[in-house]
Amino acid sequence: MRRISNDAVFQFDGVGGASLDEYYNGSNRVEAYLKTFGDKRSKWDPPAADDQTVEAEWGFEPGLMPDLLSIGQAAGANIRTLSLEQPEQLSVFVADFYREWYGRIGIPPKRLLAASFMLLDPWLALKTGSVPFWLVFNAKTSVDALHDYLNDGAAFDEIFITLFPNGVEAVGQATMADWQGVLDRARNHGGLLGVDRDRFPADLATMVRYSKAIEALPKRAAMPGALPFRKVMEFASNQSQAGVSLTGFDAA
């Protein structure tokens, strides 16, 4: 990061694809990537970093906590925080929670819906009785996260995936063969939602088609009632998810 002021930083890198070290120091695959565009450089030349802080999209700024606690105390409300080191660690927590909850209310958790980056629809995940698994990006690391989850014993009749079209080939980006390897693990059927395989990742229309594609999935009989937050608390307190912890601050 390059700090511009107390309230603003310039963020050069991002989660997914190239590593932090590759952004600043390069690598064989960074050099190969640049050469595909006719760039003679072996690495990028970003502004020198003078700070390291949370990423804009996923991080939490600790300076906000005193104000949140003050608001909670004024409203007589308790504050709960769910902490994690990497964004996709929460994906496992959420997917396991919904698998257990679906089972308790009589909905067989047979369909996995993996949503990529901003291409997600929590309402339709519920409406279609799908177990949600959020992917941080369309990178190989996200493919690996899905495989790890399935390797841990989660088996599904159907697996569907949305893929965020970032517009250009990128370092560390997963191939269609990589994604197909996940889809092939469905016991009955797997597919990409709203994705033109031949045009991806330049198929920007995916961002319009994906929601309709989810809507077209078979629906369950009825939406469940509101989920009490205490159910999430109970689940969190009984889980030992690596990297995810729940803490609370009671209103004074």
Image: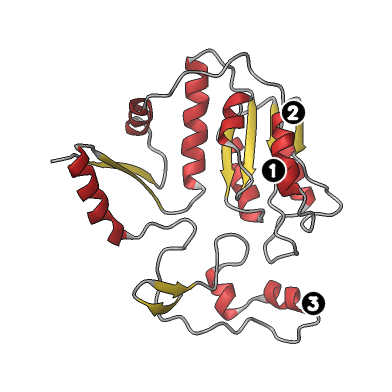
| Rendering coords of residue 83 (x, y %) | 36, 48
Q: Amino acid at mark 3?
A: Phe
What residue is shown at x 50% (from left), y 72% (from top)?
A: 11
Tag nearer the camera, 3 or 2: 2
The CA distance from mark 3 to mark 1 is 27 Å
Q: In the rendered structure, which disc, 3 or 1, sits on the residue that comes first in sequence?
A: 3
Q: Is residue 57 above or below residue 250?
A: below
Q: Is residue 26 above or below residue 214?
A: below
Provide the residue designation for mark 3.
37
Disc 3 secondary structure class: loop
The single residue placed furthest to the bottom in the displayed view is: 40
Pointers 3 and 1 in contact (CB under 8 A)? no
Disc 2 secondary structure class: loop
Provide the residue designation for mark 2.
216
| Rendering coords of residue 142 (x, y %) | 61, 50
The CA distance from mark 1 to mark 2 is 13 Å
Indicate which disc residue 162 carries: 1
Q: In the rendered structure, which disc, 1 or 2, sits on the residue that comes first in sequence?
A: 1
Q: Amino acid at mark 2?
A: Ala
Pointers 1 and 2 in contact (CB under 8 A)? no
Q: Residues within 10 Å of mark 1 (few under 14, many from 20)?
A: many
Disc 1 secondary structure class: loop
| Rendering coords of residue 75 (x, y %) | 21, 39
Q: Is residue 64 visible in this depiction of the protein?
A: yes
Q: In the rendered structure, which disc, 3 or 2, sits on the residue that comes first in sequence?
A: 3
Q: Is residue 48 above or below residue 116?
A: below
Q: Is residue 184 visible in this depiction of the protein?
A: no
Asked whether 9 or 187 is in front, the reply is 9
The CA distance from mark 3 to mark 2 is 39 Å
Q: Amino acid at mark 1?
A: Thr
Q: Quadrant of the C terminus?
A: top left
